[in-house]
Image (spheres, rainbow, N blue to C red):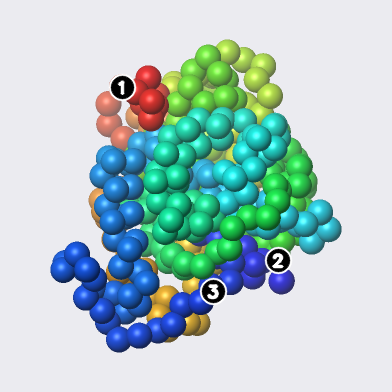
Amino acid sequence: MAFKKALSSLIIALPAVLGLVVSPRATCPDGVNTAKNAQCCSLFQVREDLLNNLFENECGDAAHGALRLIFHDAIGIDPQAGGGGADGSIATFNETELTFHANTGIDDVLDTLGPFLQKWSHILTPGDFIQFAGALSLTVCPGAPQVKFLLGRPAPKAASPPNLVPEPFDSVQKILARFASVGFSPEEVVALLSSHSIAGADDVDSSIPGTPFDISPAVFDTQIFINVQLRGTLFPGTSGNQGEVQSPVRGTLRLQSDHLLARDSATNCIWQSFANNQAKMQSEFGAGSSSSRSWVRTLRNDLIPTPPPFTGTASFPPGLSHADVEQACATAAFPNLPTQPGPPLVVPPIPQADGS
């Protein structure tokens, strides 16, 4: 489990914390904030800049990209191939890592986040910045968990080795094996895919950038686990794209990997268990960021705001019902859910961070 501990979580991957000494709560120079560790005072200004000027306090494309960047940086570690994991190498050595096919589209994410990374490079290393931005991105998404942030990652020394990021056209066995190599169980893999509830695809079908994976991409909810279990009937754009299968709702795109994980015997019951359990989704998504250090919670509470609560109800999209479920779990029936009222949905694309 050494590599799992090194990653800690692909959501908020946390390598060893370096050089922080606990001290009594200090009043920060801004005269407003206080922190148990005075070294954290400098991060409040970074936080406000990211929330107001990068994410614009919305669970939109910039927030989605920051969360995606965490994973693509953190998964770059392997017991045989090497790599530094969540060290920021995807930003520092982008000329290498952006050539990896699985990182298609990350250039746009770095174009958006890069100016802020450079602006605050005197305060945060690339690895710390990516993790901090990702933790903050969840705070603008209703229903998301409040996650912990630890400071102290060293600067990256080299690019990640290639072929470490799972692809949407990979088999379930290949995906689970990749995660197992760094200590993740099938249950943890499915929990990590909760991130797809606030995600979309720009490059799977490049003719329709910003196509969401479920009907509520601005809300961290269980809809992804419901939508993917429904029978696919259409493509939102063109057909024949690698890594895409038919989806049940116009305007949404279904990844082949999600489709298979929801139906494979190794993971289908795990997938189904999240369909109407918001609390489970929240707790298991961020479970890997826990720590026994008593001051970690203080860092979280000081720096990471509480996300807005989820106020909805797990439900089928308008016009769809339990009859549209492709039952896969053999030991439990898919939960009975209400159907949202109204005509069939056409989900709009996620507005792009560049304004398009």
Q: Quadrant of the C terminus?
A: top left
Q: CA distance from mark 2 to mark 1?
A: 48 Å
Give how far across and how far down residue 241 sits, in percent: 65, 20
Q: Which residue is mark 1?
A: 343
For marks 3 and 2 on the same chain, the one whose residue lies earlier in the sequence: 2
Q: What numbered label is drawn on residue 18?
A: 3
Quarter of the rendering containing residue 53: top left
Q: What numbered label is drawn on residue 291?
A: none
For the residues bearing labels 2 and 1, Cβ distance under 8 angstroms: no
Q: CA distance from mark 3 to mark 2?
A: 18 Å
Residue at screen point 38% across, 25% down: 354
| SS state under label 1 | loop
Residue type at mark 3?
Leu
Residue type at mark 2?
Phe
Packing grade of label 2 (10 A; few <14, some 14-19, many >=20) is some
| Location of residue 193 with respect to 27 vertically, above or below | above
> Which of label 2 and label 1 is nearer to you?
2
Q: Which residue is mark 2?
A: 3
Residue type at mark 1?
Pro
| Location of residue 162 with respect to 176 vertically, above or below | above
Q: CA distance from mark 1 to mark 3?
A: 55 Å
